[in-house]
Amino acid sequence: AAKSLGGNRHCHFLPTMEERIVARRRMVNDLHAALSSDQFFLNYQPIVNLKDGTVSKVEALLRWKHPEQGLISPAHFIPLAEDIGVIGPISNWVAREAISRFAPRCRAEPQQFEVAINVSPVQFRRGTRAIGTLLETIEEFGIPYSSIVVELTEGMLLNLDDTMKKKFAMLQEKGVKLALDDFGTGYSSLSYITKLRFDYLKIDRLFVHELGTDPTRLALCETMVWMAHKLGMKVVAEGIENEVQSRILTDLGADFGQGFLFARPMSFDDASQHIDATNKKAECRASPIALAG
Ligand code: C2E
Ligand code: MG
Ligand code: MG
Ligand code: MG
């Protein structure tokens, strides 16, 4: 087979079809082993309240430390995990890990602190116990349901049927919040926004990028903020990397910001420290008397 493909091989840097198949097969095997051999861990990225600079949310982001290849991006292995049917157990692990870590803070700051987790459409298909498991985990750690935000992408809403709608309604009845992630990319159609009642709209970083120099992006961000608020949603702007972007989004009325300007995704310990330090600073700014007294 290698021989017949060989004729087309005019670039040394592009892997052949066969090499790609072998690499994929290897990754599939490794992915099966990853969960049982503790190769996954979570990073947490703080989300900042643009009005007062406090941090009352984090997003949990999955990381895979491959024994030979090092860190592999979730953008690479999540689609594969969905294909080969291991996304369910991985997602359950993510929710459990994030909730167990932040449970003390969620209990200490009810109606205040939130942990966002990303979910995949595959895990919510008919017959899976994804939602039941999530609710049980929340109950087990004794945190308010409202401490948890479930982030869905538009792709997830493509095949949303009544069964799935009911499942999400059940989550929301308990108090769990929903965020529409990466808004404006993918299968963008405004009708998706009406399929579920979202608490948050996350503006994709595509629109935040070059916000300061591109009037079209500015107009789109302004429109998205306006629309989200009209529909009763709070806005999170993703991928804020500089002060100009932060200033503009704050002026446009975006509620929350997430991005390298404020904080990168980091370990639980670093995130906890970052949250405490940031909130202390913000408190001092808000009431200078507290500093003196
Ligand atoms: P996402 O949910 O949109 O997460 C935000 C992504 O933007 C993260 O990439 C984060 O590191 C990155 N980011 C944050 N601030 C900035 C910034 O200022 N500049 C730039 N350039 N990037 C920024 P990450 O961690 O590589 O995750 C990629 C995607 O993988 C996530 O996008 C999410 O869709 C998926 N993902 C991550 N963890 C999970 C998980 O536990 N389950 C599922 N199903 N998907 C996950
Ligand atoms: Mg997300
Ligand atoms: Mg996103
Ligand atoms: Mg994304």
Image (spheres, helix red, strand yellow):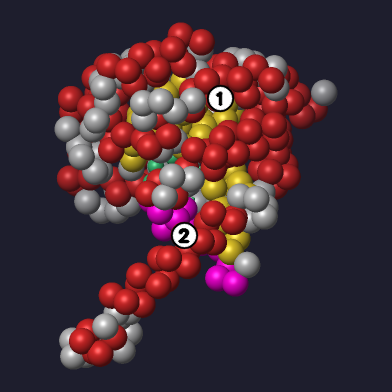
**Crowd rating for badge 2 (residues with CA inside 10 Å; few <14, some 14–19, many 20+):** some
Look at 26% across and 22% down and name the residue there.
161
Q: Earlier in the sequence, mark 2 or mark 1?
A: 2
Provide the residue designation for mark 2: 28
Residue lying at the far top of the rendered structure: 173
In this figure, what is the number of numbered marks? 2
Q: Is residue 103 left or right of residue 201?
A: right
Using the rendered image of the protein, determine whether residue 222 is visible from the camera's viewpoint.
no
Q: Quadrant of residue 271?
A: top right
Please tell me whether residue 249 is drawn above or below residue 255 in the rendered image.
below
Provide the residue designation for mark 1: 133
Residue lying at the far right of the rendered structure: 293
Check if residue 277 falls in the magenta segment.
no
**Crowd rating for badge 1 (residues with CA inside 10 Å; few <14, some 14–19, many 20+):** some
The magenta-colored residue range is: 68-80
Q: Quadrant of residue 102?
A: top right
Q: Is residue 239 left or right of residue 104?
A: left
Secondary structure beneath dot 2 equals helix
Mark 2: amino acid: Val
- Residue 111 location in percent, x, y? 59, 15
- Residue 121 location in percent, x, y? 36, 35
